[in-house]
Image (spheres, rainbow, N blue to C red):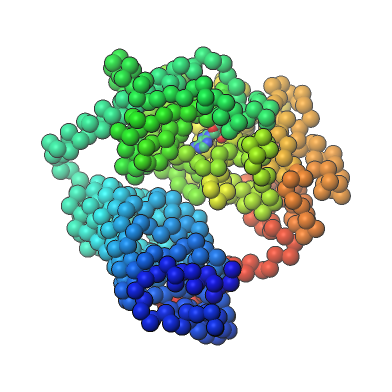
Amino acid sequence: ASDSELLLKVKDNLENYGSYLDSWNSSTPPCNVGHANWRGILCYEGKVWGVKLENIGLAGFIDIESLKGLPYLRTMSFMNNNLEGSWPEIHHLVGLKSVYLSNNKFSGEIPYRTFAGLQWLKKVHLSNNHFSGSIPTSLTLLPRLIELRLEGNEFTGPIPHFHHLNRLRSFSVANNQLQGQIPTTVSRMPISAFAGNERLCGAPLESCTVKPSTASMIVALVVVCLAVLVIGSVVLILHRRKNRGCVTGADNPPSSLGKGRGREMYDDNRSSFRSTTSSHSRRGDPMRLSFLRGDIDQFDLQELLRASAEILGSGCFSSSYKAALLNGPIIVVKRFKQMNNVGKEEFQEHMRRLGRLSHPNLLPPVAYYYRKEEKLLVTDYVQNGSLAVRLHGHQSLGEPSLEWPIRLKIVKGIAKGLEYLYRDMASLIAPHGNLKSSNVLLTESFEPLLTDYGLVPVTNQEMAQDIMVIYKSPEYLQQGRITKKTDVWCLGILILEILTGKFPANFLQKGKGSEVSLASWVESVVPEEWTNAVFDQDMGATKNSEGEMGKLLKIALNCCEGDVDKRWDLKEAVEKILEVKQRDDDPENFFTSFASEADMMSST
Ligand SMILES: Nc1ncnc2c1ncn2[C@@H]1O[C@H](COP(=O)(O)OP(=O)(O)OP(=O)(O)O)[C@@H](O)[C@H]1O
């Protein structure tokens, strides 16, 4: 559809604009080069880059589906109107730099991932609406955020920990119902930014040493009891499966990986939390779930009690269960089988460390549970399942295979997530330790999320050697050592798997070099034959893209280099990966340059 058709649809869904939008009609395009024809439309070189409809008493709803079709849309303002209803899901407006919805009547919770991936977003103005629930945690990851105005809503819970606030010049969460300690990252803001939230404490407000009221103690007690019941049910379900043998994703042929397997098990193993809860709680085990993320009120524990558990898969290392809450998020509870040598303090400290990590390509744990013989990690459920299933199980699931642009996006996301782990878990020799396709999950927009990272220090050493991918590396198999470049080897093998569609035989190895590795097979084929013999035929290579595919394949081979001294380090590998383009003739990153020019013009 043309810009004009899309914007007319937007108009159709708005109400009460009177004659203000008379210029919005199909007789002229919204933009001519140099100027706008339509009122409230901002143009740049003949392209629609902004919609600004303020102070006109608008009602109706914002048709985001149509706005999605405007590739150059960078700013959107509907301030000072009468718009109501739930949060307009701006998640897909990926080029957006500013969003102004203040002084309307929007209400309800804002999905916590709604800002994920909106990497250009600088200004978010949502003040004086009726938004409720937690402040969405995805806001905390926006790298360019300079203005965040959330005052005058009904947000509850704590203020999340923001990561990129050096540039922030305008911030307010005043007049909400927030509570808890103000994170140090925002404590330099003026008192007025926090005013009107009775239960907030810590600098710049008063310190947090107030005695808890009786009411809050009762609430805390109820929450702990519910947590005990929920964990009881999960533990019981997990116990039932305890001795059913061990099948690692890594040791399995691709056909039995992931979703397909999960579905088979679903029928046999569907369990109700409620039915198992009561029997387990009678035994009165002292159990406590520790939450690592601020927005825990997303987990309504009473709802959890009514939820059903479904087995996603079970490996040597872990078994994963999906639990669907009635009106809330779907979560995954993962039980680890090989962590019983770790002391409580050490385990807790490590989990807190993992909980502090935050990056758009990581799936952080939400909560954990520690008992000597049981370790559970709770994470969000990720919609599109694992990369392993998408690569190897898509045919049996009747789903289309992944095209080259998506595969490249996945590789870049994995590289960025790994780079972050190397920076923030620098003390670990292998900051990931178990990078493989079943530990890469895909969001709805196929953004990859790394999981099961940073677990080497809390895993039993002798079992880790059988389970974790780093211990399949040439340096470990030949010299019994791992290095800072061992995760890079795992990355290389993973990229080969993504490009060839073949499951890496390396991971099947129990002993030394018993199988031809994926890397040596690729190396045995001459580059001229790569298009026909090496690249996954389902990837859709074209004359324009195969050169770039070849570049990525060479990068992977450099990462898989058996001689650790010659192997690239992570920094070099990531730099090279991020340089790969979708096509040989990619225009000089038009998107990026346009975005920064348009920003200079955005006076709003
Ligand atoms: N949060 C999640 N959302 C969606 N699917 C998940 C999630 N966590 C795990 N899975 C999927 O569930 C299945 C089982 O995962 P799990 O981590 O227990 O085993 P694995 O990765 O196959 O093997 P291993 O035990 O060696 O880690 C895998 O297909 C995995 O991709």
The x and y percentages for residue 110 are 37, 53
The x and y percentages for residue 10 are 46, 69
Quadrant the N terminus occupies:
bottom right
The x and y percentages for residue 379 are 44, 37
Query: Can you name the residue that lies furthest to the left here?
Result: 214
Q: Quadrant of ligand 1?
A: top right
Q: Residue at x 74, y 42 (%)?
A: 500
Q: Is residue 150 left or right of residue 533?
A: left
The answer to whether residue 233 of the structure is visible from this angle is yes
Residue 226 lies in quadrant: top left
Q: Residue at x 17, y 38 (%)?
A: 216
**145 in relation to 567, above or below:** below
**405 in relation to 485, above or below:** below
Q: Residue at x 76, y 52 (%)?
A: 541
The residue nearer to you, when weighing 16 against 101, is 16
Instruction: Count the numbered circles shown.
Output: 0
Residue 350 lies in quadrant: top left
The x and y percentages for residue 594 are 57, 72
Q: Is residue 143 left or right of residue 255?
A: left
Q: Is residue 413 left or right of residue 543?
A: left
Quadrant the C terminus occupies:
bottom left
The residue nearer to you, when weighing 41 against 267, is 267
The answer to whether residue 488 of the structure is visible from this angle is no
